């Protein structure tokens, strides 16, 4: 299929093209990453690469074929480094282009990071603003929160390697974090469901972020685990605390996700955070959903 409707390049990372079930074209300046979800032959892949070179001349390109498992590198143009730095809102994050789904930086969570910065930026001088970052992965929310003035972030993820990248992300931004990178970020390599006692002792929190995987065998099952996670959160919030809840699964639409949250947290008012224009899924509600939950007055 032809690559039509290619938009101009942006200054920051963005999704240039999204054809659900077919392909995605992401841009991490200066690198283009074309992700194929439907299998294509060598000739077709070469002509896609030619088209991209014609429209975006001089930009390195990596093509990932995710129609096979594990994913394969199906093509490459120019210099594509093993590891690079992406910049968003003046903050830097590590990216490993050859890691398939596990590249270290979720481009579609841009609005989530923006909201975290806005919320942490509301902190009044001298006030405590603790953040609990559940399913922290490479801790991009933590960097964003600390840069905006959060006083402490507790990051928890059962994958120790991801948290190590998280530490590097903090080090990378040392000079951009008001308190530098020191004791304000905690990294807990544990299963969240076995750590509620510890997490509570590190609180109370002004903001709790929950960004779980859609489902991960043995560690997170959406319908079983999201409700029991939600039930534990209110007791960890401080008086003004809010929740940022995500769901990135086609299994539930907005209404179902809201019903799930309202069922467990009836005293919270919910606000939908719609994905930015470049991440609008073709079928409304099937992609990433973000809810900001605040206790009703
Ligand atoms: C979608 S990623 C989180 C992305 C991250 N919030 C970000 O913005 O970059 C999901 C993460 O959840 C972690 N995870 C899954 N089940 C878990 C559990 N029961 N306890 C702790 N971490 C878990 C995985 O290791 C993975 O890093």
Image: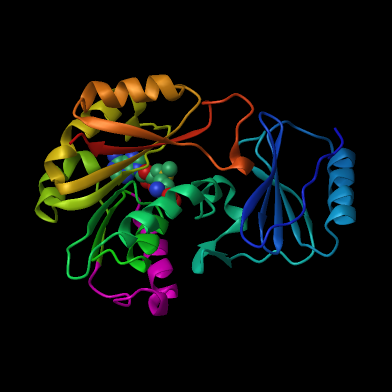
Position of residue 160 in the picture relative to residue 10 (left or right): left
Above or below residue 174? Residue 237 is above
Magenta stretch holds residue 174: yes
* Color scheme of the displayed model: rainbow
> Where does ligand 1 appear, by image quarter?
top left
Q: Position of residue 16 (x, y in %)?
A: 70, 47
Q: Residue 95: which quarter of the image? A: bottom right
Position of residue 248 in the picture relative to residue 84 (left or right): left
Q: Position of residue 279 (x, y in %)?
A: 60, 40
Above or below residue 152? Residue 19 is above
Above or below residue 159? Residue 45 is above
Q: Is residue 249 visible?
A: yes
Residue name at image x 12 percent, y 48 percent: 200
Work out which residue is located at the far bottom of the displayed protein and give it.
Answer: 175
Q: Which quadrant of the rendered structure holds the N terminus?
A: top right
Instruction: Give the dominant element type of the magenta stretch: helix, strand or loop.
Output: helix
| Front residue of 58 and 277 | 277
Position of residue 63 in the picture relative to residue 211 (left or right): right
| Front residue of 54 and 147 | 147
Residue name at image x 87 percent, y 46 percent: 46
């Amino acid at each position: 299929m032809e690559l039509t409707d290619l938009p101009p390049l942006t200054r920051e990372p963005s999704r240039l093209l999204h054809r659900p079930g077919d392909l995605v074209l992401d841009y991490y300046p200066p690198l283009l990453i074309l992700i194929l979800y439907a299998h294509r032959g060598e000739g077709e892949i070469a002509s896609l690469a030619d088209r991209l070179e014609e429209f975006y001349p001089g930009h390195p390109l990596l093509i990932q074929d995710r129609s096979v498992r594990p994913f394969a590198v199906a093509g490459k143009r120019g210099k594509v480094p093993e590891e690079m730095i992406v910049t968003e809102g003046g903050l830097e994050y590590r990216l490993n282009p050859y890691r398939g789904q596990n590249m270290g930086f979720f481009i579609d969570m841009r609005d989530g990071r923006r909201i975290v910065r806005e919320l942490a930026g509301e902190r009044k001088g001298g006030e405590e603003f603790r953040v609990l970052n559940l399913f922290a992965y490479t801790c991009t929310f933590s960097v964003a929160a600390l840069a905006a003035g959060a006083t402490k972030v507790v990051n928890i993820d059962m994958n120790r390697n991801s948290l190590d990248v998280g530490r590097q992300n903090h080090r990378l931004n040392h000079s951009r974090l008001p308190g530098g990178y020191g004791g304000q970020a905690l990294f807990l390599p544990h299963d969240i469901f076995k750590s509620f006692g510890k997490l509570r002792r590190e609180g109370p929190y002004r903001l709790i972020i929950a960004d779980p995987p859609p489902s991960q065998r043995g560690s997170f099952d959406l319908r079983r685990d999201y409700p029991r996670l939600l039930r534990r959160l209110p007791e960890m919030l401080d008086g003004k605390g809010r929740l940022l809840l995500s769901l990135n699964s086609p299994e539930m639409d907005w209404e179902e996700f809201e019903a799930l949250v309202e069922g467990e947290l009836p005293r919270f008012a919910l606000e939908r955070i719609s994905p930015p224009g470049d991440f609008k899924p073709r079928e409304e509600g099937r992609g990433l959903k973000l809810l900001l939950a605040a206790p009703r007055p």
